[in-house]
């Protein structure tokens, strides 16, 4: 025998000097390295002599006891050898990793350290080590000693770091599957899987569901290295042990990364969707596919249609998000109406664009029933005209005045209006129970008669309707020859008295110029307040000379919540510039003003802090600026 050559027996079989038996948890490559070291050989030399981790070969070299003496060891070695022969993809034979604590307790190499994606020591809860701290190199299988690095450093002295609980439990499951043991509390997706299937699922969850993964996340170079595998196993472990919530959250994050793009399921998840159908097609992966289908039903915004053959029809009927044209057919409305319902917030939807610029709308399927009721609660302008007894021209003049909440079904001027049915029915209910007359008395007039002969303008008609709704002017009867509000019958003297009082009473509505005078501000400032929603104004359709109107109560509400800097400066007898500097020192800043958002007049929210400063510097108690609970709320911000 040479320095490292074995003694040969009959039949040219190597006669090993030392014949240690494999351990029950020992890995095949780790055992062969320990055997080579015991016989003063290198691992490659042992392999060249034909010594393999196979029960027949080991028995021939007397490296296994008699089967009758230790049947469990023979069964364990046979199972691992079978996996080496037929499940080569599960093994990490290119790279080596270990737990220093386990080596210190028992100088054998665990079988679980030799499989892919087993990154944590299930016993000690630390990350496995694959790099020597002394030489900085990866620990190689081609070293001389099992317990030492190729540089001679003792591997038992390496430092190991604590790992999270979920990766530790995942490693424990992998180890139990490899050694044929039962493991408690296995996550639902892993039930019934073997080692190779678990590794496939880990690669899928930790690769495809990582938003930072590349175009081919399953193609992991050097997957046996800890620096490559631990991010994959960490993400997969978190998803598996918080199933299915974490799985659904991961899918939703991938969907959010593609907001605004028109993508189907395959376009959204790319190969992740294809691999779910083809790579995880075994029945054992049914819980994964079921969880994905559940997410599609509840959260997918891709507009799933019946063209998707994988999803059963019962599932498609229950999906949360459907294309806008499908929703339009269900509600018997136009796609333009669906789009407008989404814009005004009645129907929840999301719009995206294809690469060619085409718009694609999806809406919540589970909200269509409520939207259907909403649509049924509205009337179009033609129906409202017929019910109220008004002509087209007058209805256009009165529409937004009588029904401020009326809206267009789209943003195109040619489209019809939607009017709340309840508001129309409220007007029609006035006078119910009054006597119906075919010809009013000579001292009486119907509203239809007044409309015809008095030529009432839009403001007067609205004032009449409002005073009748308030009960200050009550009809005496209903004219059977008229319709709607035209049926109301009043004494002529009542109508004349009401009209005279209307001509002398101050209007409850003000135009923008009149509002500026009432607020002691500039017109451009008033326009800014309206456009930025500090003052609510109602747009008037086709009212000559008036674009919008503002109620006096809106002005009072603004004054109760805000105060112009000029008003405060006048009280404190300082300039507006000095006031702004003074309040800024107290961390009180204007809502908007000169140089800010194009508003040319400073104003502040009426807060307790502002009242305290005013009281301090003016010697008053802030009574001039008394604050209500509403005025102390955070002011609305501009959305321009």
Image (tube, rainbow, N blue to C red):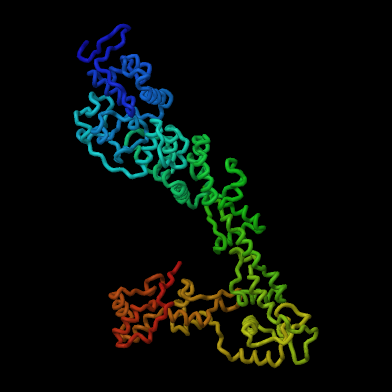
The image quadrant that residue 190 belongs to is top left
Residue 590 placed where, x, y %?
36, 74
Query: How many numbered circles are shown?
Result: 0
Looking at the image, the residue that sits furthest to the right is 438
Q: Residue at x 64, y 74 (%)?
A: 423
Residue 312 placed where, x, y %?
60, 43
| Image quadrant in which the N terminus is located | top left
Q: Is residue 231 visible?
A: no
Residue 98 placed where, x, y %?
28, 33
Q: Residue at x 68, y 91 (%)?
A: 494
The image quadrant that residue 208 belongs to is top left
| Image quadrant in which the C terminus is located | bottom left
Instruction: Please give left or right for residue 138 compared with residue 68 in the image.
Output: left
The image quadrant that residue 601 belongs to is bottom left
Q: Is residue 566 above or below residue 213?
A: below
Looking at this view, is 65 or 77 the one in front?
65
Q: Is residue 486 above or below residue 367?
A: below
Residue 34 placed where, x, y %?
27, 23
Q: Residue at x 33, y 80 (%)?
A: 576
Q: Is residue 4 visible?
A: yes
Q: Is residue 174 above or below residue 637?
A: above
Instruction: Please give left or right for residue 37 compared with residue 482 in the image.
Output: left
Looking at the image, the residue that sits furthest to the front is 69
Looking at this view, is 378 or 289 the one in front?
289
């Amino acid at each position: 025998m040479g320095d490292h050559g074995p003694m040969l027996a009959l039949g040219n079989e190597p006669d090993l000097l030392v014949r240690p038996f494999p351990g029950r948890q020992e890995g095949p490559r780790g055992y062969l390295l320990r055997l080579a070291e015991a016989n003063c050989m290198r691992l490659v030399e042992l392999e060249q002599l034909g010594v393999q981790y196979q029960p027949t070969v080991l028995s021939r070299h007397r490296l296994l006891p008699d089967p009758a003496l230790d049947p469990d060891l023979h069964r364990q070695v046979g199972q691992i050898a079978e996996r080496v022969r037929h499940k080569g993809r599960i093994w990490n034979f290119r790279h080596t990793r270990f737990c220093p604590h386990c080596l210190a307790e028992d100088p054998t190499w665990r079988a679980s350290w030799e499989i892919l994606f087993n990154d944590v020591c299930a016993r000690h809860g630390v990350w496995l080590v694959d790099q020597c701290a002394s030489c900085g190199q990866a620990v190689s299988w081609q070293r001389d000693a099992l317990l030492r690095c190729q540089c001679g450093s003792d591997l038992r002295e390496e430092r190991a770091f604590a790992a999270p609980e979920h990766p530790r439990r995942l490693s424990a499951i992998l180890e139990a599957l490899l050694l044929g043991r039962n493991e408690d509390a296995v996550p639902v997706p892993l039930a019934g899987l073997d080692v190779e299937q678990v590794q496939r699922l880990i690669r899928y969850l930790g690769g495809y569901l990582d938003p930072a993964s590349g175009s081919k996340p399953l193609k992991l170079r050097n997957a046996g290295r800890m620096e490559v595998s631990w991010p994959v196993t960490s993400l997969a472990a978190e998803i598996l042990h918080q199933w299915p919530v974490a799985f659904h959250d991961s899918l939703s994050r991938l969907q959010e990364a593609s907001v605004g793009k028109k993508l189907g399921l395959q376009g959204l998840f790319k190969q992740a969707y294809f691999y779910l159908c083809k790579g995880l097609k075994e029945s054992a992966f049914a819980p994964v596919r079921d969880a994905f289908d559940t997410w599609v039903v509840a959260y997918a915004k891709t507009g799933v249609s019946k063209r998707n053959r994988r999803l059963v029809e019962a599932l498609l009927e229950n999906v949360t998000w459907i294309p806008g044209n499908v929703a339009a057919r269900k509600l018997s409305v136009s796609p333009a109406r669906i789009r407008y319902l989404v814009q005004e917030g009645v129907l929840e939807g999301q719009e995206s664009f294809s690469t060619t610029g085409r718009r694609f709308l999806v809406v919540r399927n589970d909200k269509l029933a409520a939207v259907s009721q909403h649509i049924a609660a509205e009337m179009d302008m033609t129906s409202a005209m017929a019910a109220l007894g008004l002509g087209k021209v007058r209805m256009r003049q009165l529409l937004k005045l009588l029904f401020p909440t009326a809206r267009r079904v789209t943003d195109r001027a040619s489209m019809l209006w939607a009017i709340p049915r309840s508001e129309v029915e409220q007007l029609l209910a006035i006078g119910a129970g009054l006597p119906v007359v075919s010809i009013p008395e000579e001292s009486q007039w119907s509203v239809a008669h007044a409309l015809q002969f008095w030529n009432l303008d839009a403001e007067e008609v609205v004032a009449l309707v409002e005073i009748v709704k308030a009960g200050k002017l009550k009809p005496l009867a209903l004219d059977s020859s008229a319709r709607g509000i035209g049926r109301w019958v009043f004494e002529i003297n009542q109508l004349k008295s009401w009209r005279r009082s209307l001509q002398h009473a101050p209007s409850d509505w003000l135009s923008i110029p009149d509002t500026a005078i009432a607020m002691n501000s500039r017109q451009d400032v008033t326009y800014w307040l309206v456009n930025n929603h500090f003052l609510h104004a109602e747009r008037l359709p086709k009212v000559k000379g008036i674009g919008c109107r503002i109620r006096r109560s809106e002005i009072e509400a603004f004054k109760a919540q805000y105060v112009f800097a000029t008003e405060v400066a006048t009280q404190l007898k300082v300039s507006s510039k000095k006031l702004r500097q003074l309040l800024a020192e107290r961390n009180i800043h204007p809502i908007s003003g000169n140089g800010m958002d194009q508003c040319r007049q400073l104003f502040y929210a009426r807060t307790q802090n502002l009242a305290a400063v005013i009281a301090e510097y003016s010697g008053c108690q802030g009574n001039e600026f008394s604050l209500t609970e509403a005025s102390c709320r955070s002011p609305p911000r501009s959305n321009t």
